[in-house]
Every structure is written in C-alpha cells, then in structure tokens.
Image: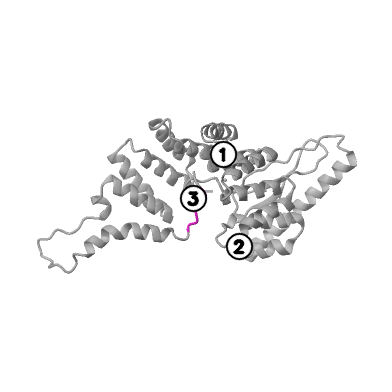
Amino acid sequence: MNEIPTMKHRAHTLLATLLLPLGLIAGCSSAPHYASTPAPKPLTRTLGSADDLRIAAGALESGDVQLAGSLYEKALKADPNSVEAYLGLGDCLFQTGDMERARLAYQRAAALTPDALAPKLALARVALKQRRFEQASQLYRELLARTPDDPAASAGLGTTLDLTGHHDEAQAIYRSALAHHPESQALRIDLGLSLTLAGRPREGVNVLLDVASIGDAPPQARQDLALAYGLLGNDAAAEKILLADLPKNSVQDNLRYYASVRAAMNSKAAIARSTQSAEPVASTTISTIPPEQARVVAVVPAAPAPKTPPVEALGSNFASQSRLIEASDK
C-alpha cells in the first residue's frame, strides 16, 4: 500500500468520474423528447463491471463507502473472480471496522492471485489492526523479503515493532526505507513518533518538524509533534499545534495526558537512578486505543516492582496503516 492520501480533493475525483458519462447524455438534451422514448435507467444499472469498478474506486476515494461497497458487490456478482473487486470490498469493510469480513475478502483476492503483493499487504494491515502482531510481523517480513525497503511494508513492520515495544528495531526499519524513499511522509512521521515513544522526544521533534512544516502536512504529523513537545514539557508549543486541528476541550485533555506521562517518566527515571538498575524496570510498550481525533498518552500500572508505570501511547494511528487512506493510516 501507498502513502496515506489526503481526502480533501476526493469529492472532486468522484464528481469528475461521474461527469463523463453524464456529459454524453447532456449533449443530447436539446433533441426532441418523444412520448415513446423510454425513461433512462439508473446509471449504475446500465454500466458494465469495468465501469462499476471505476466508479466504486472514485466513491471510495471520496469517502462514500456505502456506494463503493454496493458497486464492488455488484461487480463481484458479474465476475466472482475479480481480484480488484475483492480488494475494493475489503477496503470498504476495513474502513467501516468490519475486520473479519475484510480479512475474508482479502484472503479471497490472495487465493486468486498467489503472487500478488497487494492482497498480502492488506492481510497484514488487518492482522495489525486486530493486534495479531506475530502474524502481522510475519506477513510484513515476507513482503520485505520480496521487495526490500518497500515503503508500505516497512512502515507496517515498523509499526508492529513499535506496538510491541521494539522501538530500536522499528527505527532501523524506518531509516532503511527512508534511505531509499526520502519523500515518504508516512515513514518520517512514524519514525518521529517512534523516537518520542522510546523516550527521545527531542529527537522526535527534530524529525517531525521537517514534515509538520510542510503546507500539506497530514494531521498526524502535527499531533505527533504536539505529543513530542508535550513530553518535553513545552505545553505552550503543544497547545498551539493542537489548536490547529482540535477544539479547546480536547486540547486541554491532551495536555493533561502529557503532564501525566511526564510525571511517570520522571518517576521512572528517578527510581532507576536510586536503585542503580538493581532491579529491571518493565519495558515500555505501546497500546492502541482509538482516540476521538488526536493521539494521546496514558499511564498504566507496571509490574513487577518497582511499581513505576510505563508510558503507553493511545491511539497511535501510524501513518502507514491503511491501504485506502493510504492505502489509511500505520
């Protein structure tokens, strides 16, 4: 899957897709209308499966998941072996949160084209979304063995590693892919977030600033930059960034989370110093809980003693995770 695309122009994409056949009809509007002329049938009933797939793709890009899904289902009735229709239907189901049916659609596409990469990438995305990390990691590694440093597979594997607390390995994956694809905003955003969650927010700020300062930067870049500033204690900078995308109440909620995490991190560091690492401290892991709009952070109990809570990131919607939206999102 590709980069996470922006959605602002997608309505225009669908409109342009639909105007071509409609324009041909409009060109005849000045001709006489006879009583015997049959009424035109609905457009989607007269088009062939190729047209259905084209319009379905435009609908999906513009955010009309219901229309896209119905057209993909219609295309599958006409051609039960259409890989494109199975992938598109899987994407629709993924966007609506029906992960199990999405997985089945992607599996059917993979069975029809065993050597194709797209179905396997989609299956890895579903496994990641369902928090089946071992399976997701295996699928992403198989893809990277075939296409080294592929941006989507690298971002997916990096996200899987971050979500299981292996930040150093994740960052190595991101950096390797960025060396071959320096234009990838998704990889850079994920690298910045990984550094931040690994307890290196200053490095995270430096990486994320390069993306967030671009005019068409995605919201993820700004939200992750705010998180990094918040963990550094620069609440003023974090607040200013968050206000660009979120209402004031949500901004204040995020700032309170950042303060809690800072306190937990400071407490953890103090205990580690006082015990001189005599007893291992629980490793930091990431737990995904979908937020309303922004990425936030929570503190959860850690075990065993010393009872210092590790930092867990909530709602880490890594930029790579969707084949539709990007693919999204990680």
In the displayed structure, does residue 141 sit left or right of residue 196?
left
Q: Can you tell which of label 3 and label 1 is closer to the viewer? A: 1
Structural distance between the alpha carbons of marks 3 and 1: 21 Å
Circle 1 is placed at which residue position?
149
Amino acid at pointer 3: Ile
**Would you identify the image quadrant in which residue 28 lies?**
bottom left
The main secondary structure of the magenta stretch is: loop
Structural distance between the alpha carbons of marks 1 and 2: 34 Å
User: Is 257 within the magenta?
Assistant: no
Amino acid at pointer 2: Leu
Specify whether residue 133 is in view: yes
Residue found 74% across the figure and 48% down from its top: 200
**Viewer-side residue, 27 vs 271:** 27
Circle 3 is placed at which residue position?
325
Query: Which stretch is magenta?
Result: 3-7
Q: Can you tell which of label 2 and label 3 is closer to the viewer? A: 3
Which secondary structure lies at badge 1? loop
Circle 2 is placed at which residue position?
246
Specify whether residue 316 is in view: no
Amino acid at pointer 1: Asp
Q: Earlier in the sequence, mark 2 or mark 3?
A: 2
Q: Earlier in the sequence, mark 3 or mark 1?
A: 1
Which secondary structure lies at badge 2? loop
Percent x, y for residue 244? 61, 65
- Are there few (<14), some (14-19), or many (20+) residues within 10 Å of tag 1? many
Residue at the front extreme of this rendering = 180
User: Is 5 within the magenta?
Assistant: yes
Percent x, y for residue 118? 45, 39
